[in-house]
Image: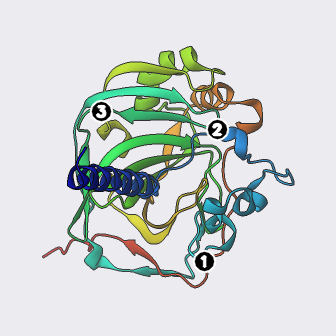
């Protein structure tokens, strides 16, 4: 082999190696807004060595869980909430899409495989990727904790996250979305990493029509607790049946039946509320 040819081969090999390293380095960035799916590494049990108080020291990439200053969830206290009508109505356009349901051990998640629609905030489009439940609620309102909290998780083209949270309390009526999913939840109950195709799921069943909402900037509520998440918490509390709540709790691991992260310090963050202007009568 001639010397120039050898140099070309070496140069090509070096370029491939650099490209591989760059691609490998980029993987964590694309997953920066995703919660971990390995619940063996953390728990929700207070006082446990893997419990919420220790999440930040389990892995270096989870350090935000312990050191972050914009962590979620928080208490939506009326003392720190400001009315901001310029936020406007939620601009979302959801549509039915193919989906699967996954038992992640620490929660039950519906993962959309098709285009389930999007949410627009400050001119940025966030695409609906998945939804999952926490029990009891992670966010509280003036110190009150409800029975169930649904998270609709969206992601922008820049891999930034926006989450809509919907709060539920046990009542006489059942939740329409959970009613559709009940047979699939029973099928994956107590089977970690079990995934079942559920066909078409309409996220509009989850969102509802309520217009009043809270808005603040926080983090993911499970490791790696990444910050910069735009939170929208719908003020209207919806109804879930006791049977549906127990079905979700019994489907996950025994020590994950209560999978709500403790409240985090608000650290003087701004919390806004949007409420439509009252209609004028002439």
What residue is at 25 percent from the left and 54 percent from the top? 3
User: Could you say which disc has been placed on residue 69 in the image?
Assistant: 1
Taking the image as shown, residue 194 lies to the left or right of residue 125, namely right
**Residue marked by disc 2:** 106
Disc 1 crowd rating (10 Å Cα; few below 14, some 14-19, many 20+) is some
First-in-chain label (3 vs 1): 1
Residue 52: x and y in percent read 74, 56
Name the element at disc 1. loop
Cβ–Cβ below 8 Å for labels 3 and 2? Answer: no
**Residue marked by disc 3:** 202
Q: CA distance from mark 3 to mark 2?
A: 24 Å
Question: Which of these two is toward me, 258 or 106?
Answer: 106
Residue 29: x and y in percent read 42, 58
What residue is at 17 percent from the left and 73 percent from the top? 281
What residue is at 67 percent from the left and 73 percent from the top? 67
First-in-chain label (2 vs 1): 1
Q: CA distance from mark 3 to mark 1?
A: 35 Å
């Amino acid at each position: 082999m001639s010397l120039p040819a050898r140099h070309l081969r070496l140069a090509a090999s070096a370029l491939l190696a650099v490209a591989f390293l760059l691609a490998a380095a980029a993987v964590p960035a694309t997953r920066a807004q995703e919660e971990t799916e390995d619940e063996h590494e953390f728990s929700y049990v207070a006082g446990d060595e893997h419990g919420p108080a220790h999440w930040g020291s389990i892995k270096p990439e989870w350090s935000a869980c312990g050191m972050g200053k914009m962590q979620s969830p928080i208490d939506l206290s009326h003392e720190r909430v400001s009315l901001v009508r310029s936020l406007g109505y939620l601009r979302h356009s959801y549509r039915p899409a193919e989906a699967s349901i996954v038992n992640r051990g620490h929660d039950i998640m519906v993962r959309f495989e098709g285009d389930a629609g999007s949410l627009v905030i400050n001119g940025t489009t966030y695409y609906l990727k998945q939804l999952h439940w926490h029990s009891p609620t992670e966010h509280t309102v003036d110190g009150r904790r409800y029975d169930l909290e649904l998270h609709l998780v969206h992601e922008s083209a820049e891999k930034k996250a926006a989450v809509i949270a919907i709060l539920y309390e046990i009542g006489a009526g059942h939740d329409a979305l959970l009613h559709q999913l009940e047979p699939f939840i029973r099928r994956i109950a107590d089977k970690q990493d079990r995934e079942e195709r559920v066909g078409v799921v309409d996220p509009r069943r989850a969102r509802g029509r309520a217009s009043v909402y809270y808005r603040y900037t926080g983090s993911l509520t499970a490791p790696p607790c990444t910050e910069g998440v735009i939170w929208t918490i719908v003020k209207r509390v919806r109804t879930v049946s006791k049977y549906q709540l127990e079905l979700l709790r019994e489907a996950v691991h025994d020590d994950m039946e209560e999978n709500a992260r403790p409240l985090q310090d608000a650290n003087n963050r701004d919390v806004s509320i949007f409420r439509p202007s009252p209609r004028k009568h002439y």
